[in-house]
Amino acid sequence: MAKLTDKVAFITGAASGIGRGITKVYAQQGAKLVLVDIADDVLDLASDLKAEGHSSVIAIQADLRNLDDLKKAVTQAKDKFGTIEILVANAGVCKLGKFLEMTAEDRDFHIDVNIKGTWNTIQAVLPEMKKNNKGSIVITSSVTGDLVADPGETAYALSKSALVGLTKSLAVELAPFQIRVNAICPGYVRTPMAESIAQQSNPKEPEAVLTEMAKAIPMQRLAEPEEIGELAAFLGSDESSYMTGTQNIIDGGSTLP
Ligand code: NAD
């Protein structure tokens, strides 16, 4: 039996990498999809899903830094599907840089997209869940920041550990409304972001960086986006009905001592 039959899910960062993997699994599990991304690839993704027979999908191009855009996206979602039951706040950015070389713009880019963008997304969607007195919010954080540290990732780590704090505090605040809030903390996942990190660390041999990343993981490989999608489907579904405020590590064993 599909986990998410007819559940309406609002997924940010759907156009690429982990968001695309989550979208694929949510579609397989029968969810109605509201796909949101700053990139126009999200429109093609929705067309592809429709061509494959998944008719309950809309795509909205929006920048998480703009709360009004997100509120409009929520209105579109309600017009199409009536409500929103699951939010996967997944979109994020990562730019490497040594601490003293990071500009204020580089720092603020992470704060604006990863922290404020996630905040805005939840502010736009939450009133709908409160009306329903039910909902599941899944936030893509990372093992970076709270659990592991790599050089050159201070701004990213700052933003991703903030999302763990947000998850826990919001979970307690929303528990009486039967709205659950859980974080996913992936290790390295094979996505354009991981490829870009490899490219930034060694522009001449990015594949060698990805190979080294894989060797350092006990399971000897990066995760595939759909593997994160399976966890996001579990957390979005009623199968995880008593889980809230959790930090779900999915990293092939990387953070084991
Ligand atoms: P990605 O770059 O492949 O995809 C990110 C998506 O977010 C893109 O489609 C992009 O257009 C969208 N996006 C970026 N800024 C946006 C904005 N302002 N408004 C709307 N959409 C925006 O990256 P990914 O690897 O799939 O990462 C997805 C999430 O997973 C991020 O939050 C990232 O921090 C987290 N994460 C990734 C890894 C990894 O190894 N790839 C590990 C841990 C956590």
Image: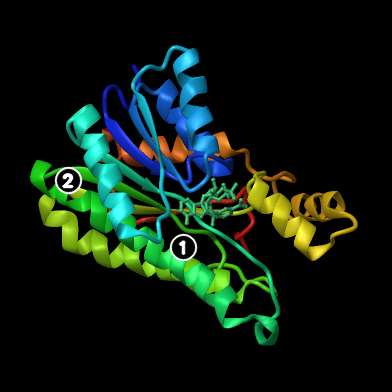
The answer as to whether callout 2 falls within 8 Å of ligand 1 is: no
Q: Residue at x 55, y 71 (%)?
A: 157
Residue shown at the point (56%, 76%) measured from the top left:
105
Q: Residue at x 30, y 40 (%)?
A: 240
Residue 205 image-quadrant placement: bottom right
At label 2, which amino acid type do we have?
Answer: Met
Residue 101 in picture, x, y percent from top left: 70, 83
Is the residue marked 1 within 8 Å of ligand 1, measured from its CB?
yes
Q: Secondary structure at mark 2?
A: helix
Q: Quadrant of the N terminus?
A: top left
Residue 11 quadrant:
top left
Would residue 170 appear left or right of 203 to someone viewing this image? left
Q: Residue furthest bottom?
A: 100
Does residue 125 lie above or below 145 as drawn?
above
Numbered disc total: 2
- Front-most of residues 154 and 55: 55
Q: Label 1 neighbourhood size at 10 Å, few (<14), some (14-19), many (20+)?
A: many
Give the Cα distance between marks 2 and 1. Answer: 23 Å
Q: Is residue 189 left or right of residue 215?
A: left
> Split into 4 quadrants, where in the image is the C terminus?
bottom right
Q: Earlier in the sequence, mark 2 or mark 1?
A: 1
- What is the crowding at mark 2: few (fewer than 14 residues within 10 Å), some, or many (at least 20)? many
Tell me if I can see residue 34 in this picture.
yes
Q: Which residue is mark 2?
A: 129
Q: Quadrant of residue 147?
A: bottom right
Q: Which mark is residue 196?
A: none
Residue 9 drawn at (x, y percent): 32, 36
Tell me the residue that label 1 is attached to.
Answer: 113
